[in-house]
Image (cartoon, grey):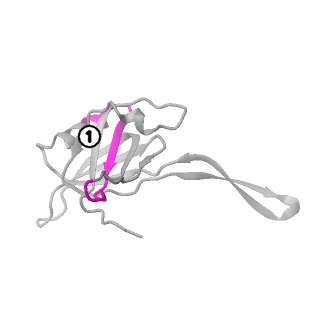
Amino acid sequence: MTIYATAGAKVFIGGVMAQQSDDFVESDFSSETWVQIKELEALGSLGDAAEEITFSAIGEARTKRLKGSRASPPMELVCGLDYSDAGQTAAIAAEKEIHDYAFKVEFNDAPEGGTPSERYFIAKVASASEAYDTANSVMKLNLSLWVNSNVVRVDAAEA
């Protein structure tokens, strides 16, 4: 078993990408032009959760739980605020739009000479807010991504 640190991970924003009925696959993202969102401090979390549907059966005195539609909680990115970073600028611009954008997360887990694992998805940039905190703090850009698709998992590969 091998585990990896989050350190070295990268997040990229692509262009506008429309939602679709079917799950996305890796090839759906192959024509994207990616811009790295730099100065990341935290990546938040990424993944799906089912909505709970309950039914209380009177005769059984038992509440039954079913899985409903799936949704991902927001992915919360925290960046050191960098006015010159093209990725941060693209994310701030995307927050002003109603569209979903393509995103890619690349991990620092490539085998020697191989390729790293990646995650692909589409999301709306729901918020882009600046946090200033105290005198001895780095000013931050907080981005909230509303994930609107499945997450495509691509495993790290040997050379």
Question: Which image quadrant for residue 138?
Answer: bottom left
**Any magenta on residue 100?**
yes
Near-viewer residue (131 or 115): 115
* Mark 1, secondary structure of its residue: helix
Quarter of the rendering occupied by the N terminus: bottom left
Q: Which residue is mark 1?
A: 91
| Residue at image coords 35%, 57% | 44
Residue extending farthest front = 159
Magenta-colored span: 93-113
Looking at the image, is 101 positioned above or below residue 12? above
Rendering coords of residue 33 (x, y %): 26, 33
User: Is 58 on the left-hand or right-hand side of 85?
Assistant: right
Mark 1 is surrounded, within 10 Å at the Cα level, by few (under 14), some (14 to 19) or many (20 or more) other residues, namely: many
Quadrant of residue 32 within the rendered picture: top left
Q: Is residue 137 left or right of residue 33?
A: left
Q: Position of residue 9 (x, y in %)?
A: 27, 56
Residue reaching furthest right? Answer: 59
Q: Residue furthest bottom?
A: 1
Under mark 1, the amino acid is Ala
Q: Residue at x 42, y 53 (%)?
A: 46
Question: Looking at the image, which residue is at 40% across and 52% down?
Answer: 155
Residue 143 lies, in percent from the top left, at: 30, 48
Closest to the observer: 105 or 72? 105
Q: Residue at x 26, y 40 (%)?
A: 91
Say left or right for 134 vs 111. Answer: left
Please tell me in which quadrant of the rendered image residue 102 appears: top left
Q: Position of residue 47 (x, y in %)?
A: 46, 53
Residue 38 within the magenta-colored segment of the rendering: no
